[in-house]
Image: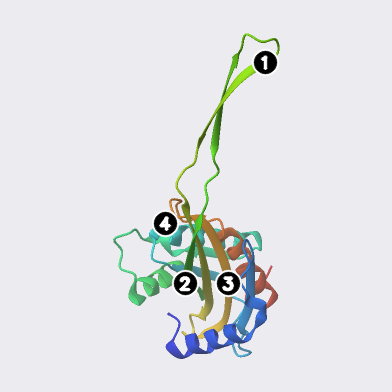
Amino acid sequence: MTLSTSSRHKTMALLCATFLLSACAGGTHVTRVQHLDPAADAPYQKLLVIALLSSYDARRYLEKEIVTQLAELGTDAVASTTMMDTRTAVTRATFMAMVEKIGADGVIISQMVHVESTSKLKDARPQATYNFRPTYYYNVWSVDLTEYVKPPGLEITTELVMATQVFSVASRESVWTMEAEFEIVQDIDQAWSYSVFPNQAKEISKLMSRDGLIVN
């Protein structure tokens, strides 16, 4: 259950055609690129949540956020990372076994479909140290100023596009898709932040509810 090549091409073409997905620091811009199939067996009562990201920790974090948001809307969902570890094979067979184990009737799959980074030099703030000493003259002080300026740092701006699909277990077909573009700005020596995931999960669950994939 992954995005097909044709689906990716159609999705990326739509992204290029819409101004709603222009990058904006700190914001998330969402568009639905495939509306709910009228023939789909939605709403779904039990969902398996899968994040296909390179980092296991990132997968676990995003899946947990999606499960939490769905639970707040009254929908039962299970994160795939609660039934696997870093050594478990990330394959279709693995996830199908999970579907059977929890009795899921729907599957949510989120994955990055575009990542682009740019960098620029960023001047560091100088650090000043003052040393005051009295002189022989009344109310006259001697002041020594020492400034230390760190070398310029490197600021990384990363633009990402995440696609989320919902699959019907009965038909094994994708019934709904959405994509979101967001931006992360950070210094090169900072760890990659997962702070965008809670908002991403909230958008996913909100649109799923609005489009009738779940009942709340």
Q: Earlier in the sequence, mark 2 or mark 3?
A: 2
Q: Earlier in the sequence, mark 1 or mark 3?
A: 1
Dot 3 falls on a residue whose secondary structure is strand
Q: Earlier in the sequence, mark 2 or mark 4?
A: 4
Q: Residues within 10 Å of mark 4 (few under 14, many from 20)?
A: few
Q: Inspect the image, locate mark 4, and give the three-letter code of the amino acid beneath it.
A: Asp
Q: Is residue 188 visible?
A: yes
What's the CA distance linking mark 1 and mark 4? 60 Å
Can you identify the residue that label 2 sits on? 115
Q: Is residue 67 visible?
A: no
- Give whichever of 111, 156 is nearer the camera: 156
Q: Residues within 10 Å of mark 2 (few under 14, many from 20)?
A: few
The tag on residue 112 is none
Residue at 52 percent across and 51 percent down: it is 123
Residue at 39 percent across and 72 percent down: it is 95
Label tally: 4
What's the CA distance linking mark 2 and mark 3? 10 Å
The tag on residue 140 is 1
In front: mark 2 or mark 4?
A: 2
What's the CA distance linking mark 3 and mark 4? 21 Å
Q: Inspect the image, locate mark 1, and give the three-letter code of the amino acid beneath it.
A: Val
> Circles 3 and 4: CB distance less than 8 Å?
no
The tag on residue 181 is 3
Residue 5: x, y in percent?
Answer: 43, 88
In the image, residue 141 sits, relative to residue 209, either above or below, namely above
Check the image and name the residue furthest to the front: 137
Q: Inspect the image, locate mark 2, and give the three-letter code of the amino acid beneath it.
A: Val
